[in-house]
Image (spheres, rainbow, N blue to C red):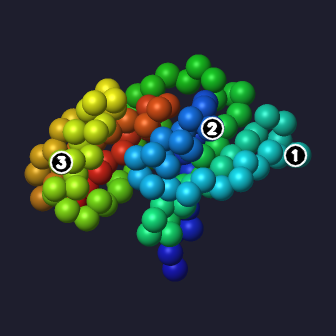
Amino acid sequence: MRLAHIALWTADLDGSARFWATHFGADIGDEYVSRNRPGFRSRFVKLPDGSALELMSGPWIEGRAEGEAPGWAHVAISLGSAEAVEAAAVRFAAEGLLVSGPRTTGDGFFEAVVRAPDGALIEITA
């Protein structure tokens, strides 16, 4: 058994796909437009390790407030080393996307937290 993919709602499907491609080297799949659910669009983005995210959008997502809400709290992406986390944190900070800088958490993870364009939190870990 394995996790097939994680889905994230976004108000800006193409902008979110570019974010994942730019910052995490993801390959962007073709856009899917539902014939059965008017307004629903999605794209899969595949990370270099083969894991995938489904970015989903629809007019009902517009105006959703950023911040914590019921549902998934964050996605964690392992960059493989503390040095990679530190370097990525500098890049994210330059774009105003760094939420909390690199640190070792109480449970022993070395991580930083960044925010995707629509507010989803992403832990980048060693």
Which residue ends up furthest to the right in the rendered image?
A: 35
Q: Kindly identify the amino acid type of the residue bearing the numbered disc 1.
A: Asn
Can residue 32 be seen?
Answer: yes
Q: Which residue is mark 1?
A: 36
Callout 3 secondary element? helix
Please identify, in this view, whether the residue under mark 3 or under mark 2 is nearer the observer: 3
- The numbered mark, 3 or 2, whose residue comes first in the sequence reads 2
Q: Which mark is residue 18?
A: none
Q: CA distance from mark 3 to mark 1?
A: 44 Å
Callout 1 secondary element? loop
Q: CA distance from mark 2 to mark 1?
A: 19 Å
Q: Nearer the viewer, residue 21 or 41?
A: 21
39 shown above or below 8: above
Q: Which residue is mark 2?
A: 13
Question: Can you give x and y, in whole percent of width and height, for residue 119 in the image?
Answer: 44, 31
30 shown above or below 114: below
60 shown above or below 26: above
**Residue drawn at point x = 28 percent, y = 39 percent:** 91
Q: Are marks 3 and 2 in contact (CB under 8 Å)?
A: no
Please identify, in this view, whether the residue under mark 3 or under mark 1 is nearer the observer: 3
Q: Kindly identify the amino acid type of the residue bearing the numbered disc 3.
A: Glu
Q: Kindly identify the amino acid type of the residue bearing the numbered disc 2.
A: Leu
Q: CA distance from mark 3 to mark 2?
A: 28 Å
- The numbered mark, 3 or 1, whose residue comes first in the sequence reads 1
85 shown above or below 57: below
Callout 2 secondary element? helix
Can residue 71 be seen?
Answer: no
- Image-quadrant location for residue 76: bottom left
Q: Which residue is mark 3?
A: 86
**Residue drawn at point x = 45 percent, y = 55 percent:** 25
